[in-house]
Amino acid sequence: MPNRSILIHTARRRLELYEGNRLIHQYPIAVGKGSTPTPNGHYTIATKTVYPGGVFGSRWMGLSLPYYGIHGTNNPASIGQAVSKGCIRMHNHDAESLYQLIEIGTTVIIQR
């Protein structure tokens, strides 16, 4: 599998997928609100789950930090906002795309 990593810019509300040093995809995201911010740091993808829909949308990619993950949403209007409880929300079609492109163990860096 290629050497892929995820870089999340919370201030820009953007998730970037890299292959080595080359940017291969960018996605708009929603991040944590002021009272429950998305935590900066270095993590890995610990779990991948398919959902039938609902608040986590159609895909969940759990971080090595328990209770936090990258997931779809049933509220697409929230993308681009700081509204979550700390998770990274994506449009469902973007979450499905990312889900196919990464594997458990993929590095995730979250920064402002």
Image (cartoon, helix red, strand yellow):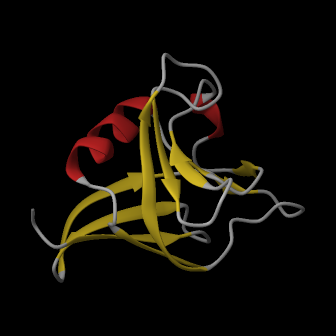
Residue 76: % across, % down? 57, 30
Residue 37: % across, % down? 77, 65
Residue 48: % across, % down? 41, 44
Residue at 63% over, 27% down: 75
Q: Which image quadrant is residue 96 in?
A: top left
Residue lying farthest to the left in this orientation = 1
Between 39 and 43, the one nearer to me in the picture: 43
Side of 84 relative to 78 (left or right): right
Above or below residue 75? Residue 103 is below
Above or below residue 23? Residue 41 is below
Residue at 46% over, 51% down: 28
Quarter of the image with the C terminus is bottom right
Residue at 36% over, 39% down: 94
Q: How many marks?
A: 0
Side of 102 relative to 61 (left or right): left
Residue lying farthest to the top in this orientation = 52
Above or below residue 112? Residue 99 is above
Side of 50 relative to 111 (left or right): left
Q: Which image quadrant is residue 26 in?
A: bottom left
Residue at 90% over, 62% down: 35
Residue 69: % across, % down? 56, 53
Side of 112 relative to 104 (left or right): right
Between 56 and 16, the one nearer to me in the picture: 56
Residue lying farthest to the right in this orientation = 35
Quarter of the image with the N terminus is bottom left
